[in-house]
Amino acid sequence: MTEPSFAGSVNIAMKIPRADYEATVAFYRDVLGLPVTTEDASSTPTVSATHSVRFGPTTLWLDRVDTYSQPDLWLEIHTDDLDGATHRLADNGIGTCDEIEPIVGTSFRSHWIKNPAGIVHHLAERRAA
């Protein structure tokens, strides 16, 4: 059995409380002058508004989460074998936590996990074509 591979993704999500959201969007758009685009948040029930920011080779997602009292940073990791990756992580004490946000509207399999420091990662299976 081959070991699953892992790779960092180009997606980072910043979950932002309602009170800080507009000022945070304005910071990236107006202060830094980065390209900021309003996006559709309807497929993610916990997110009430979202913007994407071109952040070099990365897309920084600014997500307004009305139930948050402080910001949170979420990262994405790709794997070529979701089942193998999930087993490897479980063997190392990292379980899935898909209850934190529904995963809908994707054409690939994925799970939510947290690293030992509690940072959320979207573990997404991306198979070579």
Image: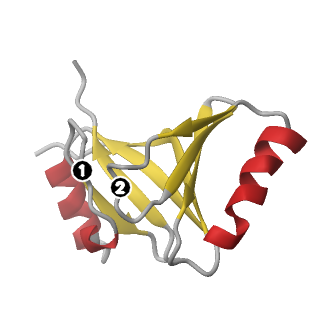
Q: Quadrant of the C terminus?
A: top left
Taking the view exactly as shown, the residue that stands out farthest to the top is 129
Q: Quadrant of residue 63?
A: bottom right
Q: Quadrant of residue 23?
A: bottom right
Q: Residue shown at 62%/69% (left/top)?
A: 18
* Residue ID at (85%, 40%): 30
Label 1 vs 2, first from the N-terminus: 2
**x and y, in percent, of residue 57 in the image:** 63, 29
In the image, is 21 to the left or to the right of 105? right
Q: Nearer the viewer, residue 33 or 56?
A: 33
x, y percent for residue 62: 60, 52
Determine whether label 1 and label 2 are within 8 Å by CB: yes
Residue 59 seen in the figure: yes
- Give the SS element for disc 2: loop
Q: Which circle marks residue 66 in the picture? A: none
The count of marks equals 2
User: Which amino acid lies under the numbered mark 2 shown in the image of this protein?
Assistant: Thr
Q: Colour scheme of this structure image?
A: secondary structure
* Residue at the right extreme of this rendering: 31
Identify the residue position indicated by label 1 in the image: 104
Q: Residue furthest left?
A: 1
The spot of residue 56 in percent (x, y) is 69, 30
Structural distance between the alpha carbons of marks 1 and 2: 7 Å
| Left or right: 41, with 117 as reference point | left
In this rendering, the answer to whether 74 lies above or below 82 is: below
Query: Any mark on residue 44, and which?
Result: 2
Residue at image location 69% in from the left, 72% down from the top: 19
Name which residue type carries label 1: Val
How packed mark 2 is, by other alpha carbons closer than 10 Å (few <14, some 14-19, many 20 or more), is some
Q: Secondary structure at mark 1?
A: loop
